[in-house]
Image (cartoon, grey):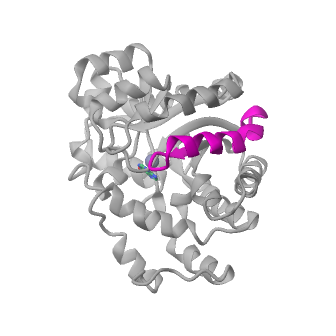
Amino acid sequence: MVSKEFLQELPKCEHHLHLEGTLEPDLLFPLAKRNNITLPEGFPKSVEELNEKYKKFRDLQDFLDYYYIGTNVLINEQDFFDLAWAYFEKVHQQGLVHAEVFYDPQSHTSRGISIETVTKGFQKACDKALAEFGITSKLIMCLLRHIEPEECLKTIEEAAPFIKDGTISALGLDSAERPFPPNLFVECYQKAASLNEDLKLTAHAGEEGPAQFVSDALDLLQVTRIDHGINSQHDDELLDRLARDETMLTICPLSNVKLQVVKSVSELPLQKFLDKNVPFSLNSDDPAYFGGYILENYIQVSKDFPHWDHETWGSIAKNAIKGSWCEEKRKEDLL
Ligand code: HPA
Ligand code: ZN
């Protein structure tokens, strides 16, 4: 098994990280206080109680219920900045060099907070991460799939200035998967893509949903990356397609265990993906909720796949760089 020091030193890229999912309990309670937010009846009262709840979620929806309550404490541009900056400070210590990070504007605009406030706060933290740590980053705006597609179209209009000027680099799709398949969002993806030909497209698919949702995201939404995608393992033709087109899956090992998608990291089809040349990266998803940031995810995988040597890990790190949406020059420098 490779050492923790080796994994720490590997230049790591993260492609599946929800900024709202970096809200640690020890920031959630102070922010609630700072912004005079009353947490709902029955919500844990202390950092310890909340950490206890985060030890296990029944499924994706059980987690999302907590996740959306957490987002309510974020109000001002400074809050969004503080949240993202805390993330960059942590992962800088872990050898992260490039991050493509999600955020959910609709979980804020639905509370009367403008997309501008949210985006500017996050963007300022990204700028500071580049200036202070040399970490490059991209913002990916996600649509919440439990919100009506018509509403989502309005969100895209609100975000249009940031899509047009490139502040938002990509569009994603998250929240409860099974009841809200990709076909509902065809028009949204077309509309967003029409605003900027450089906009990248991705979607959560095949986390709790079937392999068919992965194929549908590729065919109907024209995405060039799949978030999670682990249920692709059940469709060999799809795996061949992902390998042939070099479509990267952004795998989140600790998340999959915490949300009971798998019992343990060893159950993940990572060896199959390697053998079939399906590109993937390893990511933390919602680290404040799932018990680990990017390095902890790498370490857990190394424990569950102890036969992977330095060369295997080197190729995983390289594939993550190759699959990134950063500028070609940056990729060359990292490779
Ligand atoms: N899946 C779906 N929606 C999400 C996730 C996830 O893993 N994390 C935050 N929102
Ligand atoms: Zn996710």
Is residue 183 depicted above or below 57 in this figure?
A: above
> Magenta segment, which residues?
142-166
Name the quadrant containing residue 205.
top left
Is residue 312 depicted above or below 88 in this figure?
A: above
Q: Residue at x 44, y 35 (%)?
A: 184
Q: Is residue 57 magenta?
A: no
The secondary structure making up most of the magenta span is: helix
- Please identify the quadrant where the C terminus is shown: top right
| Residue 202 at x, y percent in the picture | 51, 33
Q: Residue at x 55, y 41 (%)?
A: 150
Q: Is residue 143 magenta?
A: yes
- Please identify the quadrant where the N terminus is shown: top left
Does residue 241 appear to the left or right of 23 in the view shown?
left
Residue 311 or 105: which is nearer the viewer?
A: 105
Task: For residue 89, say whether it is visible.
Answer: no
Does residue 261 appear to the left or right of 288 in the view shown?
left
| Residue 33 at x, y percent in the picture | 63, 84
Does residue 38 appear to the left or right of 294 in the view shown?
right
Q: Residue furthest front?
A: 150
Task: For residue 257, say whether it is visible.
Answer: yes
